Amino acid sequence: MEAALLDVSIHRTVAYRDMAAAHYDGHPYAARRGIDKLIAQGLLEERTATAPGGGSFQTLAATRKGAHKAQEAGERHGFDAGQRFRAGWGKPEDTAHDVAIYRAVRAAREELAAQGATARRIRLDGELRGIVAHRSETARARAGKAAADAERRRAATEYHLPIGPDGKVTFPDAQVEYTLTDEEGRATFGRVNIEVTSPHYSAGKVAAKAAAGFALFGSNGKAARNIVRHLVRAGKAATGPDTNARGGSSRPPSDLFEI
């Protein structure tokens, strides 16, 4: 149950059925009993959300008490001490996208684990933007615009975020930091930048995100098929995250991304 609490608190909003699949082997009775226990303990809250295509689905978010408990438990589960844990709900209009981000990160972590890598920290878009903005504005206050621009570039490079010719930083929906240990016990560090695409992403936007080194995941089956179609036309392979510390490329379609 503790691992489920960590997942919810890291990602802010997670679909109930995703928690059931990830932590209770999809068993409805065990999931209901386990999640109800977390709710009764005041660690999680449950809400009904509206699906993009109509209908509804159940979502979970951590309470402040739950986020605090997750913070205490994070290192026991292999996360770095700096991992951020969240309480409360995001904007209702962002719920479906937030849910899809959790699914994409979960899939990326599974692919990394299959290659022998261990996820150590997960940052969402807002945290990455905050880091870069804080460093840039601190430099601006100290030494002006040129210093701010230089610090923004340094921060982006440090966090493996692409920088355009105009100096603009491109942020992924999430970033997974991991370590990969070889047969001799030597550990290397890397990051995978993850982008969740909607069915409305144009071929140009898909290609640009892939060129930036992002691992692309469709928010639903149609979006995932579009990724493959657009990249095949562009002559790019459709593969999962690459443990080269610089991101990944696209991911083939999967029913995993249907709400």
Image (cartoon, grey):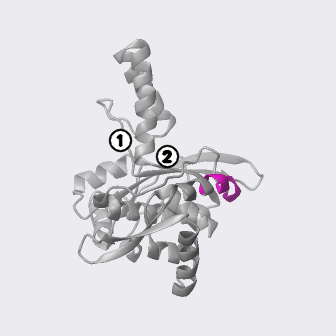
Discs 2/1, front? 1
Name the image quarter holding residue 138.
top left
For the residues labelled 2 and 1, the Cα–Cα distance comes to 14 Å
Q: Which residues are magenta?
A: 70-77
| Total count of labels | 2
At mark 2, the secondary structure is: loop
Report the amino acid beneath label 1.
Thr
Q: Quadrant of the C terminus?
A: bottom left
Residue at image position (31%, 63%) is: 227
Picture quadrant where residue 67 is located: bottom right
Residue 251 to residue 28: above or below: above
Along the line of sight, which residue is nearer the eye, 66 or 173? 66
The residue located at (62%, 45%) in the rendering is: 189
Question: In this image, 188 relative to 155: left or right?
Answer: right
Q: Residue at x 41, y 28 (%)?
A: 152
Viewer-nearest residue: 111 or 65: 65
Which of the pair 18/215 is nearer the observer?
18
Label 1: which secondary element:
loop
Whether residue 257 sits left or right of residue 198 in the image: it is right
Q: Is residue 11 magenta?
A: no
The residue beneath circle 1 is: 170
- Residue 199 in which image quadrant: bottom left
